[in-house]
Amino acid sequence: MHPSAEENLTDADAAHRASAPFLDLRSFVTFLERSGRLHRVTKSVDKDWELACIARWALESTVEKDAYAILFERVGKRSTPVVVNLYLTPEIYASALGIRAEEIFERWARALEHPRQPAEVRSAACQDLVLLGSEADLLSVPAPVWTPGRDGGPYLSAANVITKDPETGIQNMGIYRMQIHDSRHAGLYFGGKLQHGAIHLRKHAERKEAMPVAAAIGVAPAVTFASAAKLAYGIDELAIAGGLAGCSLEMVRGKTVDLLVPARAECVIEGFVRPELTRMEGPFGEYLGHVNGAAPAAVVEITAITRRAAALHHGFVQQMPPSDGHLVMEIGTLGPLWFNLTRKLGVKGIRNLAIARGSAGLSILVAQIERACASESSRIGRLLAKFNSGQKFIYLVDEDIDIRDQETLNWALSSRVNAPQDVAFVESFSSHRSTSSPSALSQGEQLVPAVPSSSVVVINAMSKGPMAELSLPDPSMMCKILDDWAETGLPPLCQRKRLKRFLGMSSV
């Protein structure tokens, strides 16, 4: 029922997890630093090439158990520090909510069952400094170029974009990319016509009205997690964020837009989108690991920038997977999926869910099925395919498989799949953008499939009969060696959960 992974946090971390979620970004950043999970870069870095390159090397060259966030203290001549790589492991994600990694999906289920409506306040830290009109200068925001040498310009990659349905008044919040065009204009790319922000824009266009927009940057972890989630239209993500945090989150009304924004955000950018106004946006290095070409997109005309004193800027280095942005996207997909399957439909037999590492945050879904429900695995696989939110492959595996260990997944696929009996193609709707689609637009344009339907490949990698003995030493012998390891004179072991799981050892 959880993303299984190595226990990475310290005893001090565990002590916090039993308390409460972090209600703003800066307290979580302080916690990570005290836990040895954040390092500072004190030298001045260029935001248009150097910052992203440093962050990428750190991502690619650090094993998961040692993963850390980075705070860049000096970004060019700007006074606002930039923090990246915040949510790199399920343990760190869980610590932001004050829970253990095993409790993530259940916390999501609770949040969806019991959302907490936001609480409006009259004044807020996010409005310590209010810049209006010509003083609201986007170029003062330290937005990096995330794919240096390829992106069309600097981007807000972790902007929690808030819009409102003009008919119902219900707000939507999603993480949509925003390109800094100049001091007063930003491109806003929703990613497709079915995105909820895009639906709001169409409704405003039908009414011949400009759409108010607020982009909250540097928000509480629960707000980011809800913003990245796959939720039904008409659900206010800020209420789900309150459910994740276990309390109603404070909101304040914007200075120039009639929208509620997170009161403890580090920075909020306000403005309006005129439906008839577009501008070329991109190229941009997308979460699928390819550069998405330039195309016309909506434009936000900036009316205000508000921020906290000594604000932080947060960004996702999400381009080539994996990254913290991908993990936030993964759990934002899996949490609601777990809720729909286990709570709404009452499906039995699904023990755990994961997105395969490196599969762009959603492309390969792995479902761990209880051995007692093996006969239902085909039905479960087809049901998972019907909930498709961008998956291309679904793997069904046994309880002994560590679904977050790629070597173990590859072994299960190699030893327990008998094609074609164990491979099924299920027709399913998908909004997935990919260079693999023959109908994708040509280079120089954004990659959008012409037809939104596709097939999901369901691969049943479960044992079809009695479980065969594994070709590993006897567990008692392995335990004895582990107890006497210091006598070997070899370096200390970094134990992997997959071996403990295979050996049937405790604490897996």
Image (spheres, rainbow, N blue to C red):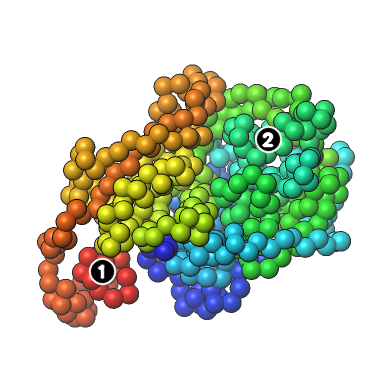
Q: Which mark is residue 500?
A: 1
The residue depicted at 68 percent of the width and 35 percent of the height is: 199
Residue 9 location, quadrant: bottom left
**Dot placed on the residue nearer the N-terminal end, 2 or 1:** 2
Most foreground residue, 455 or 276: 455
The kind of secondary structure element at disc 2 is helix
Labels in figure, total: 2
- Spatial CA distance of label 2 from label 1 is 49 Å
Most foreground residue, 162 or 380: 380
Q: Amino acid at mark 2?
A: Ile
The residue depicted at 33 percent of the width and 35 percent of the height is: 425
The kind of secondary structure element at disc 1 is helix
Residue 154 location, quadrant: top right
Q: Is residue 377 above or below residue 200?
A: below
Specify whether 359 is left or right of 179: left
Q: Is residue 279 above or below residue 221?
A: above
